[in-house]
Amino acid sequence: MSDDIPLSELPKRKMVGWYDPHLFLSTGVEVLISRALGQRFDYRMMEDVGLPQPVFDYSQNRVGGARKELWFDYMADTGDGWESSYAMACLVAQPWIELGARRLPNGAFMLLGGDEVYPAASKQEYRDRLIGPLAAAFPSGSVPRRDLYAIPGNHDWYDGLVSFSRLFTQGRTLGGWHTRQKRSYFALQLPHRWWLWALDVQLESDIDIGQLNYFHWVANRLRRGDGIILASAEPDWLYRDIKNPALESNLAALEEKCIEPTGADVFVWVSGDVHHYRRHEHARDSRYQRITSGGGGAYLSSTHEPATGGAASELKRVVRVGEDTFHQQFTYPSPATSLRLSLLNLLFLLKNWRFGILTGLAYMTLTWGQLEGSLLTAAQMAVQRYPARLVWLLLVLAAFIFYADRRVPRFRWVGGGLHGLVHLLCAFAIAGETAKLLEGPGVWPALLRLGVNFVGGAVVGPIVMGIYLLLASNLFAAHVDQASAALRLKHFKHFLRFHIRDDGVLEIYPIGVPTIPRQDEAASQYFLIEGPVTVDRAAGPPPAPRG
């Protein structure tokens, strides 16, 4: 895409409709294909052979002296709707951000922390949903030009990392942004013995041998007392205990075998993937932070804890990593706001009306023929008159069980089965009422009955789906991400602005945007979510309590 395309000619894509029929079905196929390919072919092996990469040094200024301080930005989960992506790009591109009496200058570089585009990586999706907003917000010729780095998330991997590598590893200029990396992972040397290590964990939280070799090589530069900010595309501390030996986590191996022997330490883990802001702090040493920051433009994820099962889900408040415990300190938006927003799933029909095409077709094919009487009578008649329909009924029921959240096994069978059963009952109830209104043999009455059953399914089906997602996510910690995706909320976005002060203390400013303006309105109201969060390596842990 040319940087000279006028803003008015750039496509203004809406937030991704995850429940649109073609996307609902195709995304599932892409996930299966990408996972299969990811187990058999790893693009990073080609990077290791053909693309040597240095350590990018930001510890020195342009004239060769040591930098006294450094500002840089972190933003993850971008490239969804135009309005949210453009508003966030405009905010990051501003010369400074004013917070009361403080001015926070823009960063020397920006790190995109994964899932740069939705729903799946392709040349066109990157152009429309990421490059367009970035180039429009910070056009070619902007001074000074800023560096741009990125690590891939699962959506970037859906085409085998081809489009991501074409965009970010070939020294391209995207508006006023300049890419420098040669691989999908890299290390940046920062002032005052701080480092930023950015990892590519692929689709299975895996680190390839070439990446391990690269970071072992970088580790030769580490000294005792150095501090590392580690960025990955997924908050594995929320999904699993990476230090559990049974998991054989490469992330844990990287920290234990590559970093710890040097005397350096990872003080901050930062990740996107979950589309909200949440910070966990070490229970005994506040220097150690784990931050989930996926607020760059994608749909909002919930922050409130479900009634049951929350302690075992990604919404857990207490996180254990080996022998270390981290407690949740802050979330954005607040849990109360998140719970209130989740009730919008009751409007699933209005927000995802195209999904009704699927449920309408399902209801129609389940109830073809003249079915009379009450709900149970219509269902019994359907099977007796057309025995082959029983196979279709079982397939439909199995589809709802297959769709149910597999991370909650008991819920998958009980919740998925009940969900499917409710749809079947609704389908036959509609068919029974339709038969009363449109009685009689013949082609036209039969077609009218099918049409009414389709319309009934197109209306009732999405309503049932919305209620199912609302109950599943709020009561059983199931379908938490799917319930959020259904809402397609563009508001409550954020990014992180990092500052390494002249005394070596790290400051992290989470900047929140509660309301995204419409279309091309660049100005957004923003505020400091909390903090700033400070990490002083020299402070040391507090003394252990006596007795």
Image (cartoon, grey):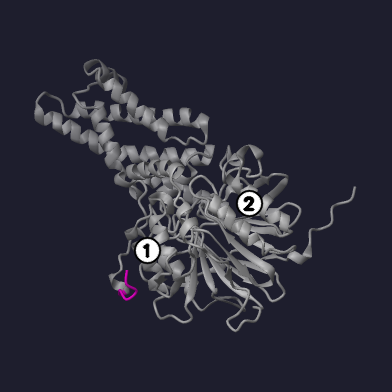
In the rendered view, tell whether residue 241 sits above or below residue 510.
above
- Residue 541: image quadrant is bottom right
- Image coords of residue 534 (percent x, y): 68, 66
Q: Residue sitting at 71 percent across and 54 percent down?
A: 260
Residue 168 locus on image (x, y percent): 44, 64
The answer to which of 319 and 204 lies nearer the viewer is 204
Which mark, residue 254? 2
Query: Residue 529's quadrant in the figure?
Result: bottom right
Disc tally is 2
- SS for dot 2: helix
Bounds of the magenta span? Answer: 1-6
Q: Is residue 353 magenta?
A: no
> Pointer 1: what residue?
82
Q: Main secondary structure of the magenta part?
A: loop
Question: Looking at numbered disc 2 in the image, what kind of residue is underneath it?
Answer: Leu
Q: Is residue 292 visible?
A: no
